[in-house]
Image (cartoon, rainbow, N blue to C red):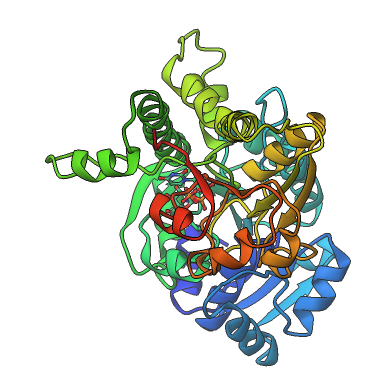
């Protein structure tokens, strides 16, 4: 099928679609495309996830407005079907790939999932198929990794026997459907004609700009937009450290800095987690590793943000010493295990780094998180005989918690607040000694 014919089938919603990887990105994308009337096949290697989805049950916990109902609707109407069998892809005209592209402990991208999906897709991919990588990849990955691998595994030639593009996603846990529908996207085809055909697909679900670019631009935009956010957060964190030492309140400083035109100082905090921000700066850096350009700001920002959970340990140690306790043997409650408020998403959570460090130092740690399975429960009960509560995530429920019920049961009433969930006054009125990140 030519790109022109494919574009027409996409306009008419007659093209048969597939999404490989039904995770935080792939599942909402598949459901939205199915809702607009396309026949969508979801390919997922985790069998239990396939089974759950085909029963119309959303495997994603946390607060995801509209997703569970949408999934039930498109499964019931048989517009979406999940499978683990790649052979089912043989009649698919457009295949989106939404698999994980993490970086390892050496900050090197791990493309195993991406390579595996391309190796499995190649042999079954039909002539004329359009393959779109939605996962975030380092600049030059489409040209140097995806294209050669797909040609090799399929025995087909790009732009002749199949078409290829990159349209990075911009979703955020907690706003998966909203972001997909309302955020603009860069659409990068290997050829301008491919880009146009990709737009014929995306305009059905994206009610915002679809910016036609080439692949390298799409790779650069996505990784740079998240590296930008990481650098901004690191700046706020560094100002927080300054405020602690000179007696300022970084939250007040930030509020007033942002009254100055063209300032958008981000929120300081107990760390930077998630599936995007801690990873994408390293993808951007990796993309230019062979182009002998020295990057200074991007790695430095990562170092500052990675340090923040360890700084929370420093604040705790100082507070314990002032209360004549040592961290070894101290009973510590960690409030918030997910990486983001009102989410169950644990990926790269700063709390994981914090808990590991606390246990290395001999603290007895209990974890509370109202969204993460296994850590829900009653915080005051967990705080019984504790020497400190460390707030790592600004879950809404924490804001309304009765602090007096917590301090009443603690052995040493210390509150270390990594997200300015409370004010010093609130904490002290409740009988707690308050140590706030960025509050000298
Ligand atoms: N964080 C701060 N200070 C800030 C903002 C965030 O410490 O000012 C921390 C959060 O606590 C969290 C981490 O950074 O641990 C990431 O937070 P995030 O708000 O950036 O949430 P993510 O990881 O879901 O980011 C995604 C990104 N979207 C995509 O990659 C498509 C990001 O580019 C978006 O800006 C963000 O969602 C969003 O706000 O939509």
Is residue 99 visible in this depiction of the protein?
no
Q: Residue 99 vs residue 140: left or right?
A: right
Q: Nearer the viewer, residue 375 or 333?
A: 333
Residue reaching furthest to the left:
261
Q: Is residue 119 left or right of residue 37?
A: right
User: Camera-side residue: 112 or 120?
Assistant: 112
Percent position (x, y) of residue 377?
Answer: 73, 70
Q: Please give the name of the residue rendered at 20% of the width and 38% of the height, measured from the top-left corner.
A: 257
Placement of the N terminus among the 4 image quadrants: bottom right
Q: Is residue 230 visible?
A: yes
**Where 38 sits versus 96, above or below?**
below
Residue 282 at x, y = what percent? 56, 28
At a point 33% along the width and 51% down the height, the residue shown is: 211
Q: Is residue 65 above or below residue 232?
A: below
In the image, residue 383 lies at what x, y percent?
Answer: 71, 58
- Quarter of the image with the C terminus is top left
* 213 or 285: nearer the viewer: 285
Percent coordinates x, y for residue 355 in the rendering: 73, 41
Quadrant hosting residue 116: top right
Residue drawn where x is 69% and y is 46% of the image:
387
Count up the numbered dots.
0
Q: Quadrant of residue 60?
A: bottom right
Q: Nearer the viewer, residue 297 or 2?
A: 297
């Amino acid at each position: 099928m030519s790109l022109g014919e494919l574009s027409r089938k996409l306009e008419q919603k007659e093209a048969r679609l597939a999404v490989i990887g039904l995770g935080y990105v792939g599942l909402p994308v598949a459901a939205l495309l199915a809702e607009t009337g396309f026949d969508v096949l979801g390919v997922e290697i985790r069998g239990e996830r396939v089974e759950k989805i085909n029963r119309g049950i959303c495997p994603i916990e946390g607060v995801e407005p509209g997703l569970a109902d949408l999934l039930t609707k498109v499964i019931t109407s048989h517009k979406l079907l999940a499978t683990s069998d790649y052979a089912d892809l043989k009649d698919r005209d457009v295949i989106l790939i939404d698999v994980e592209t993490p970086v390892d402990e050496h900050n090197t991208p791990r493309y195993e999932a991406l390579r595996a999906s391309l190796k499995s897709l190649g042999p079954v991919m039909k002539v004329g198929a359009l393959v779109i990588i939605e996962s975030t990849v380092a600049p030059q990955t489409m040209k140097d990794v995806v294209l050669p691998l797909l040609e090799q595994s399929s025995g087909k030639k790009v732009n002749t026997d199949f078409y290829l593009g990159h349209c990075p996603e911009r979703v955020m846990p907690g706003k998966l459907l909203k972001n997909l529908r309302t955020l603009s996207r860069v659409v990068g085809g290997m050829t301008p004609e491919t880009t146009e055909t990709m737009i014929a697909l995306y305009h059905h679900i994206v009610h915002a700009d679809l910016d036609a670019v080439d692949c390298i631009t799409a790779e650069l935009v996505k990784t740079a937009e998240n590296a930008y956010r990481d650098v901004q957060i690191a700046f706020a964190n560094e100002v927080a450290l300054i405020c602690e030492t000179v007696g300022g309140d970084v939250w007040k400083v930030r509020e007033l800095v942002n009254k100055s035109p063209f300032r958008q100082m981000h929120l300081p905090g107990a760390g930077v987690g998630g599936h995007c921000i801690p990873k994408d700066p390293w993808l951007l850096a990796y993309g230019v590793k062979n182009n002998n350009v020295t990057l200074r700001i991007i790695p430095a920002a990562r170092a500052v943000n990675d340090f923040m959970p360890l700084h929370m340990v420093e604040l705790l140690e100082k507070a314990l010493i002032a209360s004549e306790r040592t961290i070894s043997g101290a009973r510590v409650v960690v409030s918030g295990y997910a990486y983001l408020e009102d989410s169950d998403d644990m990926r790269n959570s700063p709390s994981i780094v914090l808990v590991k460090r606390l246990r290395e130092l001999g603290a007895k740690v209990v974890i509370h998180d109202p969204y993460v399975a296994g850590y829900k429960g009653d915080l005051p009960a967990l705080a019984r005989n504790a020497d400190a509560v460390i707030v790592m995530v600004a879950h809404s429920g924490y804001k309304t918690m009765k602090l007096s019920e917590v301090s009443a049961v603690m052995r040493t009433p210390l509150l270390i607040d990594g997200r300015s969930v409370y004010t010093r006054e609130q904490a002290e009125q409740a009988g707690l000694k308050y140590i706030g990140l960025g509050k000298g």
